[in-house]
Amino acid sequence: ISLSRKGMGCWEEVVRVVFAYLGMLKYHFMEGQEEGLAPWIHDELKSIAELSYRYADEGDVTEIVEEVAENMAPWFNLPQERILDGDALLFDDAVDNTAVKNLLFDYFTPENLRVDLMSSLFGRDADFGDSKAEDEEEEKKEEPEDDEEEDEGSVEQMDVDVDDGDLNEAFFDREKAGQPTVEPRFGTKFWVEDISEDTIQTWTNVAKPQLPSKELALDLPPKNPYIPSKFDLKPLPADDAAHPLLNCSVKVCVAVGKKKSWFPAAVTKYQMEKNKHRLSLSYEDEGEKWHVLDSPNDYTKFEGEEEMLESGHEGSFDGGKIKFKVTAVPREGEGIVFSYGDAGHDDDVEDGIAFPPLPPPSPASRLPQLIHDKNSFKLWHLQDRKFKRPLGDLRVKVECEGMNDSALNQACMALFCRLCSDALTETCYLASISELGSSLYPTDTGFSIRVHGFDHNLLALAKEVLNVVMQFRGREGENDLPSTIKDGRFDACLEVQLRKYSNAGMNASSFSTSLRLICLRPAVK
Protein backbone atom coordinates (compact mmCIF):
# COMPACT_ATOMS: atom_id res chain seq x y z
CA ILE A 1 0.00 0.00 0.00
CA SER A 2 1.50 3.33 -1.05
CA LEU A 3 1.07 6.08 1.53
CA SER A 4 1.26 9.85 1.29
CA ARG A 5 3.05 11.92 3.94
CA LYS A 6 -0.27 12.26 5.75
CA GLY A 7 -0.88 8.51 5.43
CA MET A 8 2.45 7.76 7.12
CA GLY A 9 1.20 9.62 10.17
CA CYS A 10 -1.92 7.44 10.46
CA TRP A 11 -0.74 4.05 9.20
CA GLU A 12 -2.64 2.27 11.98
CA GLU A 13 -5.89 3.59 10.48
CA VAL A 14 -4.87 2.28 7.06
CA VAL A 15 -4.31 -1.20 8.50
CA ARG A 16 -7.65 -0.93 10.31
CA VAL A 17 -9.41 -0.42 6.99
CA VAL A 18 -7.66 -3.51 5.60
CA PHE A 19 -8.96 -5.63 8.48
CA ALA A 20 -12.42 -4.10 8.05
CA TYR A 21 -12.39 -5.43 4.49
CA LEU A 22 -11.31 -8.86 5.74
CA GLY A 23 -14.18 -8.73 8.25
CA MET A 24 -16.57 -8.07 5.35
CA LEU A 25 -15.20 -11.14 3.52
CA LYS A 26 -15.69 -13.24 6.66
CA TYR A 27 -19.28 -12.03 6.86
CA HIS A 28 -20.06 -13.79 3.58
CA PHE A 29 -18.99 -17.12 5.11
CA MET A 30 -21.22 -16.90 8.18
CA GLU A 31 -24.33 -19.01 8.66
CA GLY A 32 -27.40 -17.54 7.04
CA GLN A 33 -25.35 -16.00 4.23
CA GLU A 34 -24.63 -17.44 0.83
CA GLU A 35 -21.81 -19.94 1.13
CA GLY A 36 -18.66 -18.11 0.24
CA LEU A 37 -18.19 -15.41 -2.35
CA ALA A 38 -20.21 -14.97 -5.50
CA PRO A 39 -19.30 -17.59 -8.17
CA TRP A 40 -18.82 -14.91 -10.83
CA ILE A 41 -15.69 -13.66 -9.02
CA HIS A 42 -13.95 -17.01 -9.60
CA ASP A 43 -15.32 -17.20 -13.16
CA GLU A 44 -13.87 -13.78 -13.98
CA LEU A 45 -10.46 -14.66 -12.55
CA LYS A 46 -10.43 -17.93 -14.48
CA SER A 47 -11.42 -16.24 -17.73
CA ILE A 48 -8.80 -13.50 -17.32
CA ALA A 49 -6.08 -16.05 -16.57
CA GLU A 50 -6.95 -17.96 -19.75
CA LEU A 51 -6.87 -14.79 -21.85
CA SER A 52 -3.57 -13.65 -20.41
CA TYR A 53 -1.98 -17.03 -21.08
CA ARG A 54 -3.46 -17.53 -24.54
CA TYR A 55 -2.51 -14.10 -25.87
CA ALA A 56 0.67 -13.50 -23.88
CA ASP A 57 3.49 -11.63 -25.57
CA GLU A 58 6.54 -13.59 -26.57
CA GLY A 59 8.88 -13.51 -23.57
CA ASP A 60 12.59 -13.85 -23.11
CA VAL A 61 13.77 -17.41 -23.75
CA THR A 62 15.96 -17.46 -20.65
CA GLU A 63 13.10 -16.39 -18.38
CA ILE A 64 10.77 -18.96 -19.91
CA VAL A 65 13.30 -21.74 -19.29
CA GLU A 66 13.71 -20.61 -15.68
CA GLU A 67 9.93 -20.60 -15.12
CA VAL A 68 9.52 -24.08 -16.61
CA ALA A 69 12.41 -25.39 -14.49
CA GLU A 70 10.80 -23.93 -11.36
CA ASN A 71 7.45 -25.53 -12.24
CA MET A 72 9.21 -28.90 -12.33
CA ALA A 73 10.27 -28.52 -8.70
CA PRO A 74 8.70 -31.20 -6.45
CA TRP A 75 7.14 -28.73 -4.00
CA PHE A 76 4.84 -27.39 -6.75
CA ASN A 77 3.54 -30.91 -7.34
CA LEU A 78 2.44 -30.12 -10.90
CA PRO A 79 1.54 -33.03 -13.18
CA GLN A 80 3.69 -33.43 -16.26
CA GLU A 81 0.98 -32.19 -18.62
CA ARG A 82 0.71 -28.91 -16.64
CA ILE A 83 4.38 -27.94 -16.50
CA LEU A 84 3.87 -25.11 -19.00
CA ASP A 85 0.60 -23.61 -17.76
CA GLY A 86 0.17 -24.94 -14.23
CA ASP A 87 1.22 -21.68 -12.57
CA ALA A 88 -0.83 -19.44 -14.88
CA LEU A 89 -4.30 -21.00 -15.19
CA LEU A 90 -7.16 -21.90 -12.86
CA PHE A 91 -8.49 -25.40 -13.48
CA ASP A 92 -11.26 -25.87 -10.91
CA ASP A 93 -14.84 -25.02 -11.87
CA ALA A 94 -15.43 -23.28 -8.52
CA VAL A 95 -13.38 -21.81 -5.70
CA ASP A 96 -12.57 -23.97 -2.66
CA ASN A 97 -14.64 -22.08 -0.09
CA THR A 98 -13.42 -24.29 2.74
CA ALA A 99 -9.81 -23.32 2.10
CA VAL A 100 -10.71 -19.62 1.76
CA LYS A 101 -12.66 -19.70 5.01
CA ASN A 102 -9.75 -21.37 6.77
CA LEU A 103 -7.36 -18.64 5.56
CA LEU A 104 -9.67 -15.80 6.57
CA PHE A 105 -10.54 -17.03 10.06
CA ASP A 106 -7.32 -18.78 11.13
CA TYR A 107 -4.47 -16.96 9.37
CA PHE A 108 -5.48 -13.42 8.32
CA THR A 109 -5.59 -12.14 11.90
CA PRO A 110 -3.94 -9.20 13.70
CA GLU A 111 -1.96 -11.69 15.82
CA ASN A 112 -0.26 -13.02 12.68
CA LEU A 113 0.49 -9.58 11.29
CA ARG A 114 3.82 -7.89 10.63
CA VAL A 115 3.78 -4.32 9.34
CA ASP A 116 6.71 -3.01 7.29
CA LEU A 117 6.90 0.78 6.97
CA MET A 118 9.41 2.08 4.44
CA SER A 119 9.92 5.81 3.97
CA SER A 120 12.63 8.45 3.75
CA LEU A 121 10.84 10.16 6.66
CA PHE A 122 12.75 7.83 8.96
CA GLY A 123 15.97 9.38 7.69
CA ARG A 124 18.40 8.73 4.90
CA ASP A 125 21.58 6.73 4.93
CA ALA A 126 23.65 9.92 5.13
CA ASP A 127 21.97 10.77 8.45
CA PHE A 128 23.78 7.84 10.05
CA GLY A 129 27.25 8.40 8.57
CA ASP A 130 30.53 8.68 10.46
CA SER A 131 31.61 11.83 12.30
CA LYS A 132 33.79 12.98 9.39
CA ALA A 133 30.87 12.99 7.01
CA GLU A 134 28.77 14.84 9.57
CA ASP A 135 31.48 17.49 10.03
CA GLU A 136 31.70 18.03 6.28
CA GLU A 137 27.94 18.42 6.12
CA GLU A 138 28.03 20.99 8.91
CA GLU A 139 30.76 22.94 7.12
CA LYS A 140 28.61 23.11 4.00
CA LYS A 141 25.69 24.44 6.02
CA GLU A 142 27.87 27.12 7.62
CA GLU A 143 29.13 28.45 4.28
CA PRO A 144 27.45 31.81 3.54
CA GLU A 145 25.28 32.07 0.48
CA ASP A 146 26.11 34.92 -1.90
CA ASP A 147 22.79 35.92 -3.43
CA GLU A 148 24.29 39.06 -4.98
CA GLU A 149 26.47 37.10 -7.40
CA GLU A 150 23.56 35.23 -8.92
CA ASP A 151 23.61 35.08 -12.71
CA GLU A 152 21.16 37.32 -14.50
CA GLY A 153 19.89 34.40 -16.58
CA SER A 154 19.20 32.14 -13.63
CA VAL A 155 15.70 30.90 -12.99
CA GLU A 156 13.97 31.95 -9.81
CA GLN A 157 13.45 28.95 -7.55
CA MET A 158 9.95 27.97 -6.54
CA ASP A 159 9.26 27.91 -2.81
CA VAL A 160 8.22 24.34 -2.09
CA ASP A 161 7.38 23.20 1.44
CA VAL A 162 9.13 19.86 1.79
CA ASP A 163 9.75 20.06 5.55
CA ASP A 164 8.99 16.65 7.00
CA GLY A 165 10.17 17.42 10.51
CA ASP A 166 6.78 17.82 12.20
CA LEU A 167 5.34 14.76 10.49
CA ASN A 168 8.45 12.73 11.32
CA GLU A 169 8.26 13.52 15.03
CA ALA A 170 4.52 12.83 15.07
CA PHE A 171 4.89 9.08 14.63
CA PHE A 172 8.61 8.37 15.01
CA ASP A 173 11.08 9.70 17.57
CA ARG A 174 14.60 8.74 16.50
CA GLU A 175 16.10 9.49 19.93
CA LYS A 176 13.66 7.18 21.69
CA ALA A 177 14.04 4.52 19.00
CA GLY A 178 17.80 4.39 19.54
CA GLN A 179 20.34 3.08 17.08
CA PRO A 180 18.95 1.11 14.14
CA THR A 181 19.64 -2.54 13.42
CA VAL A 182 21.78 -3.13 10.33
CA GLU A 183 20.89 -5.93 7.93
CA PRO A 184 24.17 -7.88 7.40
CA ARG A 185 23.97 -8.48 3.63
CA PHE A 186 22.80 -5.18 2.20
CA GLY A 187 23.50 -2.88 5.13
CA THR A 188 19.88 -1.69 5.36
CA LYS A 189 19.09 0.12 8.61
CA PHE A 190 15.78 -0.57 10.34
CA TRP A 191 14.03 -0.48 13.69
CA VAL A 192 11.76 -3.10 15.27
CA GLU A 193 8.91 -2.11 17.56
CA ASP A 194 6.04 -4.04 19.13
CA ILE A 195 2.52 -3.03 18.12
CA SER A 196 0.57 -1.89 21.16
CA GLU A 197 -2.15 -4.13 22.62
CA ASP A 198 -4.74 -1.38 22.16
CA THR A 199 -3.99 -1.20 18.46
CA ILE A 200 -4.17 -5.00 18.12
CA GLN A 201 -7.52 -4.98 19.91
CA THR A 202 -8.87 -2.25 17.62
CA TRP A 203 -7.89 -4.27 14.58
CA THR A 204 -9.39 -7.43 16.10
CA ASN A 205 -12.74 -5.70 16.65
CA VAL A 206 -13.07 -4.54 13.05
CA ALA A 207 -11.84 -7.91 11.70
CA LYS A 208 -14.87 -9.73 13.14
CA PRO A 209 -17.43 -11.06 10.60
CA GLN A 210 -19.49 -7.95 9.94
CA LEU A 211 -20.36 -5.45 7.27
CA PRO A 212 -18.15 -2.33 7.39
CA SER A 213 -19.52 1.07 8.32
CA LYS A 214 -20.86 3.24 5.50
CA GLU A 215 -18.18 5.87 6.06
CA LEU A 216 -15.49 3.41 4.91
CA ALA A 217 -17.31 2.85 1.58
CA LEU A 218 -16.02 -0.73 1.30
CA ASP A 219 -17.73 -3.30 -0.90
CA LEU A 220 -16.99 -6.33 -3.05
CA PRO A 221 -15.67 -5.46 -6.51
CA PRO A 222 -18.32 -4.94 -9.18
CA LYS A 223 -18.60 -7.19 -12.20
CA ASN A 224 -15.87 -6.31 -14.62
CA PRO A 225 -17.40 -4.76 -17.76
CA TYR A 226 -14.10 -4.92 -19.68
CA ILE A 227 -13.61 -8.69 -19.87
CA PRO A 228 -13.64 -9.47 -23.62
CA SER A 229 -15.81 -12.18 -25.13
CA LYS A 230 -15.29 -11.55 -28.86
CA PHE A 231 -11.97 -12.46 -30.43
CA ASP A 232 -12.78 -12.45 -34.14
CA LEU A 233 -10.22 -10.78 -36.38
CA LYS A 234 -11.40 -8.09 -38.77
CA PRO A 235 -11.20 -9.35 -42.37
CA LEU A 236 -8.46 -7.95 -44.55
CA PRO A 237 -9.40 -6.12 -47.79
CA ALA A 238 -10.04 -8.41 -50.74
CA ASP A 239 -7.39 -6.73 -52.88
CA ASP A 240 -4.68 -7.27 -50.24
CA ALA A 241 -5.73 -10.36 -48.32
CA ALA A 242 -3.74 -12.92 -46.34
CA HIS A 243 -2.19 -16.06 -47.82
CA PRO A 244 0.29 -18.68 -46.52
CA LEU A 245 2.80 -17.65 -49.22
CA LEU A 246 2.65 -13.97 -48.32
CA ASN A 247 6.04 -12.51 -47.23
CA CYS A 248 7.81 -15.76 -48.16
CA SER A 249 11.02 -15.82 -50.18
CA VAL A 250 10.91 -17.98 -53.31
CA LYS A 251 13.10 -18.93 -56.26
CA VAL A 252 11.30 -18.75 -59.59
CA CYS A 253 12.29 -20.76 -62.65
CA VAL A 254 11.92 -18.49 -65.69
CA ALA A 255 12.83 -19.27 -69.33
CA VAL A 256 15.44 -16.89 -70.70
CA GLY A 257 15.73 -17.72 -74.38
CA LYS A 258 16.31 -21.44 -74.65
CA LYS A 259 17.71 -21.65 -71.15
CA LYS A 260 15.83 -21.74 -67.83
CA SER A 261 17.22 -19.79 -64.92
CA TRP A 262 16.23 -19.44 -61.22
CA PHE A 263 15.64 -15.93 -59.88
CA PRO A 264 15.06 -14.97 -56.21
CA ALA A 265 11.87 -13.06 -55.37
CA ALA A 266 9.59 -12.23 -52.43
CA VAL A 267 5.79 -12.59 -52.31
CA THR A 268 4.45 -9.13 -51.40
CA LYS A 269 0.71 -9.18 -52.12
CA TYR A 270 -2.25 -11.54 -52.68
CA GLN A 271 -5.65 -10.85 -54.15
CA MET A 272 -8.65 -12.73 -55.49
CA GLU A 273 -9.86 -11.59 -58.90
CA LYS A 274 -12.50 -13.40 -60.99
CA ASN A 275 -11.88 -16.71 -59.20
CA LYS A 276 -8.16 -16.37 -59.87
CA HIS A 277 -5.67 -16.39 -57.01
CA ARG A 278 -3.06 -13.79 -57.93
CA LEU A 279 0.27 -13.21 -56.18
CA SER A 280 2.58 -10.25 -56.64
CA LEU A 281 6.29 -11.12 -56.65
CA SER A 282 9.02 -8.57 -56.08
CA TYR A 283 12.16 -9.48 -57.98
CA GLU A 284 15.56 -8.20 -56.95
CA ASP A 285 16.28 -6.30 -60.15
CA GLU A 286 13.03 -6.29 -62.18
CA GLY A 287 10.40 -4.78 -59.89
CA GLU A 288 7.05 -6.49 -59.23
CA LYS A 289 5.06 -8.88 -61.42
CA TRP A 290 1.69 -10.57 -60.92
CA HIS A 291 1.26 -14.33 -61.35
CA VAL A 292 -1.76 -16.65 -61.12
CA LEU A 293 -1.27 -19.39 -58.53
CA ASP A 294 -1.93 -22.94 -59.68
CA SER A 295 -3.82 -25.42 -57.43
CA PRO A 296 -4.83 -22.79 -54.82
CA ASN A 297 -6.80 -25.34 -52.79
CA ASP A 298 -3.54 -27.05 -51.85
CA TYR A 299 -2.73 -24.10 -49.56
CA THR A 300 -5.87 -24.15 -47.43
CA LYS A 301 -4.24 -26.67 -45.10
CA PHE A 302 -1.57 -24.09 -44.24
CA GLU A 303 -4.08 -21.43 -43.13
CA GLY A 304 -4.59 -22.99 -39.69
CA GLU A 305 -2.11 -24.07 -37.06
CA GLU A 306 -2.33 -27.80 -37.78
CA GLU A 307 0.22 -27.73 -40.61
CA MET A 308 2.79 -25.03 -41.36
CA LEU A 309 4.31 -24.05 -44.68
CA GLU A 310 8.00 -24.91 -44.73
CA SER A 311 11.03 -24.11 -46.84
CA GLY A 312 11.39 -26.45 -49.82
CA HIS A 313 7.72 -26.37 -50.77
CA GLU A 314 7.29 -26.38 -54.57
CA GLY A 315 4.48 -25.08 -56.77
CA SER A 316 3.75 -23.37 -60.07
CA PHE A 317 2.30 -20.18 -61.57
CA ASP A 318 0.43 -19.28 -64.75
CA GLY A 319 -0.81 -22.74 -65.68
CA GLY A 320 2.49 -24.51 -65.03
CA LYS A 321 4.58 -22.16 -67.15
CA ILE A 322 6.60 -20.96 -64.14
CA LYS A 323 7.77 -23.16 -61.31
CA PHE A 324 8.78 -21.88 -57.87
CA LYS A 325 10.35 -23.19 -54.67
CA VAL A 326 9.98 -21.63 -51.20
CA THR A 327 13.41 -20.74 -49.78
CA ALA A 328 12.43 -18.92 -46.55
CA VAL A 329 9.25 -18.63 -44.46
CA PRO A 330 8.74 -15.64 -42.10
CA ARG A 331 8.16 -16.23 -38.43
CA GLU A 332 5.05 -14.96 -36.70
CA GLY A 333 5.07 -11.17 -36.68
CA GLU A 334 7.97 -10.98 -39.13
CA GLY A 335 7.77 -9.06 -42.38
CA ILE A 336 9.10 -9.98 -45.81
CA VAL A 337 12.07 -12.34 -45.76
CA PHE A 338 14.55 -12.67 -48.61
CA SER A 339 16.87 -15.59 -49.22
CA TYR A 340 18.87 -16.63 -52.27
CA GLY A 341 18.04 -20.23 -51.48
CA ASP A 342 21.40 -21.81 -52.31
CA ALA A 343 24.58 -22.41 -50.37
CA GLY A 344 26.60 -20.38 -52.84
CA HIS A 345 24.96 -17.08 -51.93
CA ASP A 346 23.15 -17.41 -48.56
CA ASP A 347 26.29 -16.50 -46.59
CA ASP A 348 27.39 -13.64 -48.85
CA VAL A 349 25.85 -10.99 -46.59
CA GLU A 350 27.43 -12.37 -43.41
CA ASP A 351 30.77 -12.73 -45.16
CA GLY A 352 30.66 -9.12 -46.36
CA ILE A 353 30.62 -10.08 -50.04
CA ALA A 354 27.15 -8.71 -50.80
CA PHE A 355 24.90 -5.96 -49.43
CA PRO A 356 21.71 -7.31 -47.80
CA PRO A 357 18.73 -7.07 -50.17
CA LEU A 358 16.44 -4.13 -49.47
CA PRO A 359 12.82 -5.10 -48.77
CA PRO A 360 10.29 -3.79 -51.31
CA PRO A 361 8.28 -0.72 -50.26
CA SER A 362 4.98 -1.32 -48.55
CA PRO A 363 1.94 -0.92 -50.83
CA ALA A 364 -0.35 2.02 -50.20
CA SER A 365 -3.01 -0.25 -48.66
CA ARG A 366 -0.64 -1.13 -45.80
CA LEU A 367 0.16 2.45 -44.82
CA PRO A 368 -1.90 4.43 -42.28
CA GLN A 369 -5.09 5.68 -43.95
CA LEU A 370 -6.54 9.13 -43.23
CA ILE A 371 -10.24 8.36 -42.76
CA HIS A 372 -11.38 11.65 -41.19
CA ASP A 373 -10.08 15.21 -41.62
CA LYS A 374 -12.48 17.91 -40.46
CA ASN A 375 -12.53 20.76 -37.93
CA SER A 376 -8.87 20.34 -36.97
CA PHE A 377 -9.50 16.68 -36.18
CA LYS A 378 -7.59 14.01 -38.08
CA LEU A 379 -8.16 10.27 -37.66
CA TRP A 380 -5.73 7.71 -39.05
CA HIS A 381 -6.25 3.94 -39.19
CA LEU A 382 -3.90 1.04 -39.83
CA GLN A 383 -4.97 -2.59 -39.69
CA ASP A 384 -2.53 -5.05 -38.15
CA ARG A 385 -1.27 -7.74 -40.52
CA LYS A 386 1.65 -9.16 -38.54
CA PHE A 387 0.57 -10.50 -35.16
CA LYS A 388 -3.00 -11.53 -36.06
CA ARG A 389 -4.37 -11.12 -32.55
CA PRO A 390 -7.64 -9.43 -31.47
CA LEU A 391 -5.78 -6.44 -30.06
CA GLY A 392 -6.13 -2.75 -30.77
CA ASP A 393 -4.14 0.39 -30.04
CA LEU A 394 -5.83 3.79 -29.91
CA ARG A 395 -3.67 6.90 -29.60
CA VAL A 396 -5.00 10.44 -29.27
CA LYS A 397 -2.70 13.45 -29.44
CA VAL A 398 -4.15 16.79 -28.31
CA GLU A 399 -2.27 19.99 -29.07
CA CYS A 400 -2.80 22.93 -26.70
CA GLU A 401 -1.94 26.49 -27.60
CA GLY A 402 0.71 28.14 -25.43
CA MET A 403 2.27 24.98 -24.02
CA ASN A 404 5.79 26.23 -24.74
CA ASP A 405 5.17 29.75 -23.45
CA SER A 406 6.34 28.98 -19.91
CA ALA A 407 7.48 26.25 -17.58
CA LEU A 408 4.37 26.94 -15.48
CA ASN A 409 2.11 25.90 -18.38
CA GLN A 410 3.98 22.62 -18.74
CA ALA A 411 3.83 21.99 -14.97
CA CYS A 412 0.08 22.65 -14.99
CA MET A 413 -0.36 20.22 -17.88
CA ALA A 414 1.59 17.55 -15.97
CA LEU A 415 -0.64 18.12 -12.93
CA PHE A 416 -3.76 17.96 -15.12
CA CYS A 417 -2.69 14.56 -16.50
CA ARG A 418 -1.97 13.29 -12.99
CA LEU A 419 -5.39 14.44 -11.73
CA CYS A 420 -7.19 12.71 -14.59
CA SER A 421 -5.18 9.51 -14.11
CA ASP A 422 -5.97 9.59 -10.40
CA ALA A 423 -9.70 9.99 -11.09
CA LEU A 424 -9.56 6.97 -13.40
CA THR A 425 -7.75 4.69 -10.93
CA GLU A 426 -10.69 2.39 -10.20
CA THR A 427 -11.80 2.22 -13.85
CA CYS A 428 -8.30 1.56 -15.13
CA TYR A 429 -7.75 -1.12 -12.48
CA LEU A 430 -10.73 -3.14 -13.74
CA ALA A 431 -9.54 -2.62 -17.30
CA SER A 432 -5.95 -3.63 -16.53
CA ILE A 433 -7.15 -6.93 -15.06
CA SER A 434 -8.79 -7.58 -18.44
CA GLU A 435 -5.55 -6.84 -20.31
CA LEU A 436 -6.68 -3.33 -21.25
CA GLY A 437 -4.12 -0.64 -20.58
CA SER A 438 -4.34 3.14 -20.71
CA SER A 439 -2.03 6.08 -20.15
CA LEU A 440 -2.36 9.85 -20.08
CA TYR A 441 0.80 11.90 -20.23
CA PRO A 442 1.94 15.45 -21.10
CA THR A 443 3.88 16.31 -24.25
CA ASP A 444 5.76 19.38 -25.46
CA THR A 445 2.67 20.64 -27.27
CA GLY A 446 -0.20 19.29 -25.13
CA PHE A 447 -1.02 15.80 -23.93
CA SER A 448 -1.52 12.30 -25.32
CA ILE A 449 -3.88 9.44 -24.49
CA ARG A 450 -3.20 5.82 -25.27
CA VAL A 451 -5.63 2.90 -24.83
CA HIS A 452 -4.47 -0.56 -25.88
CA GLY A 453 -5.45 -4.19 -25.41
CA PHE A 454 -8.32 -6.45 -26.52
CA ASP A 455 -10.39 -4.48 -28.98
CA HIS A 456 -13.78 -5.82 -27.85
CA ASN A 457 -14.19 -3.24 -25.05
CA LEU A 458 -11.35 -0.91 -25.97
CA LEU A 459 -13.64 1.91 -27.14
CA ALA A 460 -15.67 1.67 -23.91
CA LEU A 461 -12.54 2.36 -21.87
CA ALA A 462 -11.48 5.13 -24.24
CA LYS A 463 -14.89 6.77 -23.76
CA GLU A 464 -14.45 6.73 -19.96
CA VAL A 465 -11.00 8.29 -20.24
CA LEU A 466 -12.19 11.01 -22.61
CA ASN A 467 -15.20 11.78 -20.41
CA VAL A 468 -12.93 12.53 -17.44
CA VAL A 469 -10.61 14.66 -19.58
CA MET A 470 -13.44 16.65 -21.17
CA GLN A 471 -14.89 17.54 -17.75
CA PHE A 472 -12.27 20.30 -17.62
CA ARG A 473 -13.57 22.02 -20.77
CA GLY A 474 -15.51 25.27 -20.47
CA ARG A 475 -14.46 25.98 -16.88
CA GLU A 476 -12.71 29.30 -17.47
CA GLY A 477 -13.15 31.56 -14.46
CA GLU A 478 -14.31 28.76 -12.12
CA ASN A 479 -12.27 27.98 -9.02
CA ASP A 480 -13.70 24.55 -8.22
CA LEU A 481 -12.62 21.29 -9.84
CA PRO A 482 -14.94 18.97 -11.81
CA SER A 483 -17.02 16.50 -9.84
CA THR A 484 -14.86 13.64 -11.14
CA ILE A 485 -11.97 14.89 -8.93
CA LYS A 486 -12.64 13.74 -5.38
CA ASP A 487 -12.00 15.91 -2.34
CA GLY A 488 -8.39 15.97 -1.21
CA ARG A 489 -7.04 14.41 -4.39
CA PHE A 490 -5.73 17.71 -5.75
CA ASP A 491 -3.42 18.16 -2.74
CA ALA A 492 -2.31 14.52 -2.94
CA CYS A 493 -1.51 14.76 -6.66
CA LEU A 494 0.26 18.09 -6.15
CA GLU A 495 2.41 16.50 -3.44
CA VAL A 496 3.40 13.65 -5.75
CA GLN A 497 4.18 16.09 -8.56
CA LEU A 498 6.35 18.29 -6.31
CA ARG A 499 8.18 15.24 -5.01
CA LYS A 500 8.83 14.15 -8.59
CA TYR A 501 10.32 17.55 -9.43
CA SER A 502 12.36 17.51 -6.24
CA ASN A 503 13.84 14.09 -7.09
CA ALA A 504 14.46 14.94 -10.75
CA GLY A 505 18.09 14.71 -11.75
CA MET A 506 19.17 12.44 -8.90
CA ASN A 507 20.05 9.71 -11.37
CA ALA A 508 23.03 10.74 -13.50
CA SER A 509 21.95 8.76 -16.57
CA SER A 510 18.38 10.10 -16.68
CA PHE A 511 19.62 13.61 -15.87
CA SER A 512 22.05 13.66 -18.80
CA THR A 513 19.34 12.27 -21.09
CA SER A 514 16.98 15.01 -19.96
CA LEU A 515 19.62 17.68 -20.63
CA ARG A 516 20.24 16.29 -24.11
CA LEU A 517 16.53 16.39 -24.95
CA ILE A 518 16.23 19.94 -23.62
CA CYS A 519 19.02 21.01 -25.95
CA LEU A 520 17.33 19.39 -28.95
CA ARG A 521 13.78 20.55 -28.29
CA PRO A 522 12.49 24.08 -28.77
CA ALA A 523 13.38 26.26 -25.79
CA VAL A 524 10.72 27.09 -23.22
CA LYS A 525 10.29 30.82 -22.73
Image (tube, rainbow, N blue to C red):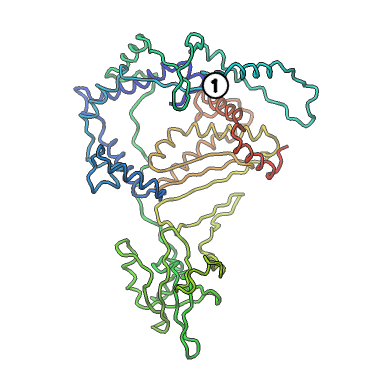
Of residue 98 and residue 404, the one placed in the foreground of this image is: 98
In the displayed structure image, the side of residue 460 where residue 396 appears, left or right: right
Q: Residue at x 24, y 39 (%)?
A: 74
- The percent position of residue 280, horizontal first and vertical second, equals 47, 73
Q: Quadrant of residue 41?
A: top left
Residue sitting farthest toward the bottom: 258
Provide the residue designation for mark 1: 124
In the image, residue 329 sits, relative to residue 233, either above or below, namely below
Give the structural element (helix, strand or loop) at label 1.
loop
In x, y percent, where is residue 457? 40, 45
Q: Is residue 283 above or below residue 382?
A: below
Foreground residue among 227 and 503: 503
Work out whether 386 lies above or below 195.
below
Q: Which quadrant holds the N terminus?
A: top left
Is residue 230 rendered to the left or right of residue 420?
left
What number of labels is visible?
1
Q: Position of residue 497 (x, y in %)?
A: 57, 29
Task: Please name the residue shown 61% across and 27% down the image.
Answer: 502
Three-letter residue code for mark 1: Arg
Quarter of the figure with residue 436:
top left
- Pick the front one: 468 or 343: 343
Question: Residue 371: image x %, image y %?
Answer: 54, 57
Q: Is residue 193 left or right of residue 366?
A: left
Residue positioned 23% across, 49% down in the render? 81
Q: Residues within 10 Å of mark 1 (few under 14, many from 20)?
A: few
Q: Is residue 290 above or below residue 157?
A: below
